[in-house]
Image (cartoon, rainbow, N blue to C red):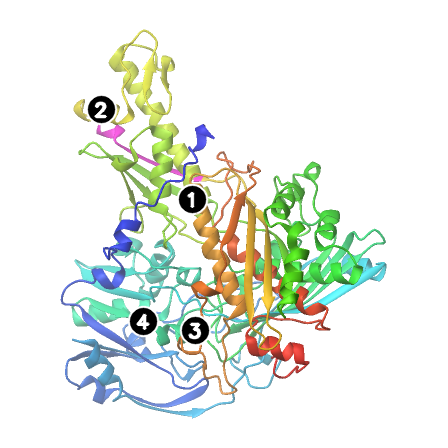
Amino acid sequence: MDKFGKSQPVTRVEDVRFLTGHGRYVDDIAPDGSLRAYVFRSPVAHAEITTLDVSEARAAEGVHLVVTSADMLAAGIDIGMASALIGNRDGTQGANPKRPVLAEDRVRYVGEPVAVVVAETLEQARDAAELIEFDYDELPVAMATAAGDNTVHPEAPDNRAFDFGIGDEEATNAAFAAAAKTVSLEVGDNRIIVNSMEPRGAYAEWQDGRVHLAFGGQGVWGMKGELARTYHMEPEQIRITNPDVGGGFGMKGFPYPEYFVLPFAARETGRPVRWMSDRTEAMLSDNGGRDLVTLAELAFDENNRITGYRLHTRSNLGAYNGMFGQMIQSNLFARVLTGTYDIQTAYYRCEGFYTNTVQVDAYRGAGRPEAIYVLERVMDRAARELGLDPLELRRINFIKPAQFPYKTVTGENYDVGDFVRVMGHAERSADLAGFAARKAASEAAGKLRGLGTCYYIESILGAPNEDVKVEFTEDGGAKIYVGTQSNGQGHETVFRQFLSDQTGIPADLIEVVQGDSDLIASGGGTGGSRSVTVQTNVTLQAVASIVEGFSDFLAGELGVEAADVRFDDETFRAEGSNVTPTMLEVAKMARDAGRDDLLTWQETATLPGRSYPNGCHVAEVEIDPETGEVVCDRFNVVDDFGNLINPMLAEGQVHGGVVQGIGQALTERVVYDADGQLLTASFMDYAMPRADSVPMIGFEFEPVPSTANPMGMKGCGEAGTVGALAAVSNAVQDALWHHGVRQVDMPFTPQRVWAMLEGDAIAAE
């Protein structure tokens, strides 16, 4: 591992700043004298706007501007937000309704932005918003993910956004027809709200004909391109920055309406304008996640080998296509359709529907948790119906080490894997041999105990290419400019640690620079667990270029051939010379010699292939049958992340992901009423996981280095959530199975579990 990182558990350098209140988030750095923006949002889910009179609000004390869609259109701004489309099964494209930055003639969900009030103070802006005359004729509300009469968009008859399919439908149907045994299970995946610690926020300012937009996001280049398109500007006229960001989870990776209005407001007022969401506002307007129902079916031969896998998913997209709305709930799901199993034929159909709710785009690794959750739930059901141990059924069907590289039926190319070895490690770590004794002890105390497992594999997504710039500074240190964006994962620590490992530059002399489109030519941002693999890959290329350039320079200085100069990760050496300068010393020599061309190095690189982290989660739950309370009592994880730069940070990522998964499994659930009003719009009604919801999490590594990148790494950012959902759900199913309960769906709140035990299907919904 020495060549590609020392794999040392280095503590995070940024934590001192964050924990002592010295973080610099977007609301901390807004320019002095900024005006405050307040968003006037729709109070109803679906209505035709009959009156929008903002004249009184414009005349209110302290108000500088009130922005409506008409104002932006009159200024020549393209107010239609971008969306992503996929093809339907019949070869046509999915529906592509316009999503305006501010509502035009109709509102389509509670919380949709209608106008933005800009004033000296937030209080003045909020008070002025109360003076807006907003009248409307309510329309029928569509809440079901099914074909219906209450049309959300005329472009989407029956509210069907898309009807996507992938795989071999004919061969899969034939496999089911010939199967010795088939197993099916309808699996619900409850809608959830992101609730990042820092809500969304932004500010905009103009200077010398250029606009600067700072926002809490997961990268700057996507937003830069969209702002250029919207305002018909050249990219050079736009600067986008991400400061410290307090959690992203996929939700902050997308453009939002407020970010397009702020530059207009700043230009019109001639002053910087800032906006910060409050918590309920965030719950109403942030992209949510999940909200899927899938019928999953497996076909088996007489030896319990899977011969076919068939899924039909109904997906709620909310009111609009997001930037990746259709793709998230279809293509990404399909990429891990067959998981870790040797399945020769599969077919996946996903129907997306519009409803009068906030859109569903991404959350905690959209596509991977949903897919693995469904597959591992139906595998658990199959084990029960076939009378097999769940681990044994997995062993029978795992892709074997000798089968790698392995191409799945949906085109993924798994490079390496040893799933039996990883699962065996988890079996020992979780002490499955001791489960019977723990179950007996629970029963003696009047409790029900269940055991659940999940074996996941994750396809690392996002752009495979990335940029880096390394600059040697006059103060004797170095800066590394990265194209990814930390949302709290510890990138400052990881990337300077990696550069230090490769160059010998002391880590405390390296500064990581991120999130500024003026300083970094391009980049892919953060998402899909891509950051470490793509950024370290391009950093290796930059280091190789630096070593080559410095070697040529030293050869001239020392009077030797460039081929005779060697770099041993800390110092340069040459035959016949006692000079052994470090990289920083060579940089100083180059500066003194006037060779400024050797002080800045920039590279772009593309990964040759995806990596596939995988692992086994084992959960144990204890249930009080009198109250329905579920306690996650034990949780153990063994992960194959390949080679690691910093095991401590990887473990922290997994811990956070597992807690997220436990939160969705036990407490989190978005609820709308029949009129499209959000009933879970505060932490009084939406239950986030707490410390007492989570046991001590056992965590160990079983690395099988990737061959798809020179570092042998595999991403880890979403791994905890991917496995936790199914492990906890399968544990609850195990505990309730012997009490006649055959269908369990998240979240496992006391009321719902008690109703399952009592056979009250209505109360269990």
Label 1, label 4: how far apart the Cα atoms are:
33 Å
Residue beneath disc 3: 99
- The dominant secondary structure in magenta is strand
Kindly identify which residue carries mark 2. Answer: 590
| Residue topped by disc 1 | 648
Range covered by the magenta-colored residues? 596-605
Mark linked to residue 277: 4
Comparing 277 with 220, the one in front is 277
Residue 564: x %, y % from top left = 37, 12
In terms of secondary structure, where does tag 4 sit? Answer: loop
- Badge 2 crowding class, 10 Å Cα cut-off, few under 14, some 14 to 19, many 20 or more, is some
First of labels 2, 1 by sequence position: 2
What whole-number distance in Å separates the C-alpha atoms at marks 3 and 1?
A: 43 Å
Location of residue 382 by image quarter? bottom right
Q: Identify the secondary structure beneath mark 2.
A: helix
User: Does label 3 or label 1 sit earlier along the sequence?
Assistant: 3
Q: Amino acid at mark 2?
A: Ala
Task: Look at label 3 and name its amino acid.
Answer: Arg
Mark pair 3, 4: CA separation: 20 Å
